[in-house]
Amino acid sequence: MTSMRGSRQLKMVVYFLTTGLHLLTLPRGSVAEIPNKPSGTVTDLSSTKSAPGDHQIFPDAVKPDLPVFAMNYPRIQVPFEITLWVLLASFARIGFHIYHKVPFWVPEPCLLISIGLMLGAIMHAVHEEPPAMLSYDLFFLYILPPMVLDSGYFMPTRPFFENIGTVLWFAVVGTLWNSIGVGMSLYGVCQIGALEVQDINLQENLLFASIISAVDPVAVLSVFEDVSVNEQLYIVVFGESLFSDAVTVVLYNMFTFVAEMPEVEPVNLFLGVAKFFVVDLGGLAFGLVFGFVASFTTRFTSKVREIEPLFIFMYSYLAYLVAELFNISSIMAIVTCALTMKYYVEENVTQRSCTTIRHVVKMLSSISETLIFFFLGVVTITTEHEWNWGYILFTLLFAFLWRGLGILVLTQIINPFRTIPFNFKDQFMLGYSGLRGAVAFALVFTLPDHIGRNKPFVSTTICLILFTVFIQGISIRPLMEFINVRRTNRNLDTINVEVHSRLMEHAIAGIEDICGQWGHYYWKDKFMKFDNQFLRHILIKDNRAESSIVALYKKLELQSAMEILDIVSGDTSTAPSAGVFKSYSMRSGACLIHVLPHHLLHSPGVPNVVICLAD
């Protein structure tokens, strides 16, 4: 062993001597070639340290050059993929509307879900995991607010307040009716041993029923607008879908807390009822406060017009976040804030700011709904499900049964108090309009982990959404044509009709006051007087006292002029004829001159009669 070690050391000495002699014999500037190391030698120079200034025998390791091109995909993965998803959805919607007959019969949510299903099938075929992008906080703090803001800001204000009692009746009492009825029925079905769902208790069934009670009739409302359905039916379906979301979220949070309790005591039921009213009324109060603050702030933005839209979005989002901070209804807060801002803020800001606000609100809402429907389609294919078809079929049956019974019973109670009662055709359309959509899917997908059987809840909700969106959404138009639902003649919505309608409202309010009856018109007239005497002086700049009929006349004239402006600026080939402009200018006092810019007045699509009036 000693002789082998000595032989190895001798070979190393010979190797270094040979290398040194070779280097000394080379001329200055020549390239040195190091002879091969003798086999069997092991050199470890890592521990060898050269003195400062000494030249090493071996050259240093080659250092990497400065990279000219490099990739760091993990750093931008999340925003990059979200952008691609939104772009894909936008391209799909463009292609969807190129052939006009497709959107006429097939609602847009059907398209988005179908594309999501195809993407999910591709991802499943290549064994790609779905993007884990949907969480409880992500949905409630970032995705839901734009959707609710859009619904609240674009709600028809006057029809809504004329039917607010009916809207709240169906939204609050109807949602409670469906949640309790479906939940109790499913709990009874769970006692059947053949379905293998005995472990789902009453609290979890009530939680699931509250989730699927949230209606989202996006497809139905678009059809209602196309066929000009009667105003009462449209606003009740619109308002019910909006406020039922608020009620559903309150019930969702309450039943999620109750599901953790091993036993529910009677005092908890009393506290739950009290919490329900406190949460909703608190959201209403927060929305009013932030709406008034936003209106007051926009009084002073005349020198900085570019930040006017920013105040609208920030104050509405603050109302939502502060409501979430105190665990009250954030949906009610942002809806109330949007209604308040629309009434006051639009009189403080410029028309350009109003247009910006409307387009941005629609854009954000569209992106949120697109992401939810896309994700629904992808999750349907790529996620592992628990398909309990017995539980799914009973859920579909009870969802349709209890909604139909609820509409019939609640309508019979509310009809005697309505000026225009709902007939049987209207009641049928109210029941058939109960589609489920983005809110129901997001709530069930973000169920907490302590809910033991959340997989069958997710699978059942997906089946309910697909059935209502595809079957009811596609069949709603031919069904309306078949039963001939009452419609509104929009050609009669002229300024003359509107002015005389307001005149009749003032007359009816006076008659109610004389008779001592406190009806709808009486309270409306009281609010208008309080608004003109106090609120408008505080919240609106340069507020001048004028007749409400005169104010209505000016507002409708400006709205009509802006509609013509949109036509002319968008496509001059489809601009109205000279006769239309002449008729319009005669009944409006030629206010179009003050609205259309000079370059649009002299564009080729504008008739000569308008140019002559302007010049």
Image: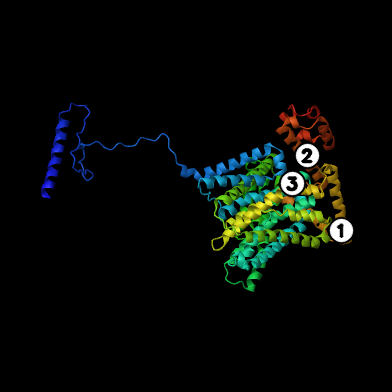
Q: Earlier in the sequence, mark 1 or mark 2?
A: 1
Q: In the rendered image, which quarter is residue 578 located in?
A: top right
Q: Residue at x 85, y 61 (%)?
A: 517
Which of pointers 1 and 2 indicates the residue nearer the eye?
2
- In the drawing, what numbered circle is on residue 223? 3
Q: Secondary structure at mark 2?
A: helix
**Residue marked by disc 1:** 512
Q: Earlier in the sequence, mark 3 or mark 1?
A: 3
Residue 218: image location, x then y, percent: 69, 49
Which of the two residues, 137 or 99, is positioned nearer the viewer here?
Answer: 99
Residue 20: image location, x then y, percent: 15, 34
Q: In the rendered image, which quarter is residue 215 located in?
A: bottom right
Which of pointers 2 and 3 indicates the residue nearer the eye?
3
Is residue 242 visible in the rendered image? The answer is yes
* Mark 3 neighbour class, 10 Å CA radius: few under 14, some 14 to 19, many 20 or more: many
Amino acid under disc 2:
Ser
Q: Check the image and name the residue furthest to the bottom.
A: 266
Number of marks in the rendered image: 3
Q: Secondary structure at mark 3?
A: helix
**Residue marked by disc 2:** 560
Q: CA distance from mark 1 to mark 2?
A: 33 Å
- Disc 1 to disc 2: CB gap under 8 Å: no
Residue 22: image location, x then y, percent: 16, 31
Amino acid under disc 1:
Glu
Q: Check the image and name the residue furthest to the left.
A: 3
